[in-house]
Structure formats: structure tokens, C-alpha cells
Amino acid sequence: MIENDDFIIEFRKAAELPSANWVEWIHESKGRTHCMECLVLDKCWFTFDNKPMYPKHPFCHCKIQQIPYEFVVRVAKAESAYSKIDPYLFDTNGKYGHGKNKVFESWGYTINDALWLQREIERQGFNKYISGDYYLGKLNEQGQRINIRIELERKNGTGTVSFVSGWMVRPNGYITLNTPYGGK
């Protein structure tokens, strides 16, 4: 799991800090019925310019509340389960058959790199999320998905590769990895 302390120093040393305005989605319970999408957005954090449509629907009781960027950097975290890399990404048990392992192997990565890949994807996911460098994905009763572009150095040659990873936004600045490789 990547948390704030590992990267706060890195960001404070940077010449320019993102100036994104952050907001927290607040679901206010009024009446007897509740929109499932509004409920799953409750307490989730987004940049003002990159948040789900607000209001979500007519008679929506939700509100958005501004939160300081410094607070976001201090509290936000990104986490991924190791199982998203092994066995899923490298398909070590032959269960998935999606071929994602072949893509990573073509870049020089093997199952021996699994822990490093997990940590690197978390690190970049965290950095890009708190910088507002993400794209909104599908929103449903499961939650709000975001896509974050990951860049890796090729291990078997020169240059870098870039791909999209899929995340779920959770309350209080917490994002969890859904898929490490969602395509180019």
C-alpha cells in the first residue's frame, strides 16, 4: 500500500505543485429513497474539474465541499492487492487466458518483477491521482472508476511503455486498483 509519507517529501521538493481544487462528495439523506450512485460517491474525493456530473439527477440532495490540496496529499492513499499482479496479470495459474502476461513479458518483465510492479503501479497511481491526472470511468452501484496512465521503462531495451490502469475511488481519498493493465 502506498500512503502519503513516502511521497510528500517528493512533492514538496518539486518546483511546481498541482493547483487542483479538490472536493468531497457529500450525500445528504433527505426522504426515503436514495440514488445508489450518490450513495457510493459519499465522501469520495475528486478534483473540481474532474468529478462526476453534479448534481447527479433532479432533486439530488448531494453537495460538494472543497477540501485543501495539502489535506489530500497528507491523507490520500493508493492500494493494490498482490493478487492483481500474481496470479491475475501474469496468469500464473492459467485461469484467465487474457494474454496480459505476454504484453509485460514483451517489455522484459516477468513474475520475478511482480512485487516491484505492484509498488510502482501504486506509486504512480497515487501521484497521478493527487495531481488530478486521471480520467473518470464507469459509475454504477459499485462505485466510481477512474483510469490512470502508467509509464514504465522497458527492461529489455530502450524507451518507455505506457498503458491504462483501472482504479476505484473509495471514501476519504482512498483508491484501489481494479486492473493493473486495462489496455494501451
Image (spheres, rainbow, N blue to C red):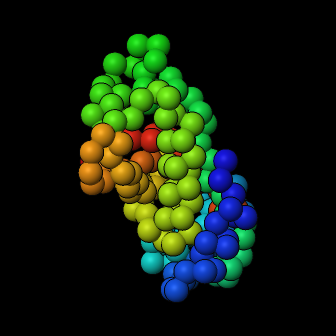
Instruction: Tell me: residue 168, above or below residue 88.
Output: below
78 up-or-down from 16: above or below: above
Q: Looking at the picture, how far across and down is residue 37, in whole percent?
A: 54, 54
Q: Quadrant of residue 34?
A: bottom right
Residue extending furthest toward the front:
157
Q: Residue at x 43, y 63 (%)?
A: 134
Of the pair 87 and 65, the residue shown nearer to us? 87
Q: How many marks?
A: 0
The reply, left or right, for residue 11 in relation to residue 51 is right
Q: Is residue 109 above or below residue 174?
A: above
- In this view, 35 is above or below 92: below
**Residue in view at x 38 percent, y 51 percent:** 152
Q: Nearer the viewer, residue 111 or 101?
A: 111
Q: Is residue 94 left or right of residue 79?
A: left
Where residue 4 appears, x then y in whole percent?
A: 70, 64
Q: Please, which residue is most extreme toward the top here?
A: 94
The x and y percentages for residue 68 are 67, 82
Name the residue at 47% across, 13% down.
93
32, 95: nearer the viewer:
95
Q: Nearer the viewer, residue 180 or 160?
A: 160
**x and y, in percent, of residue 117 in the image:** 50, 42
Q: Is residue 32 visible?
A: yes
Which residue is depicted at the point 46% across and 40% down? 179
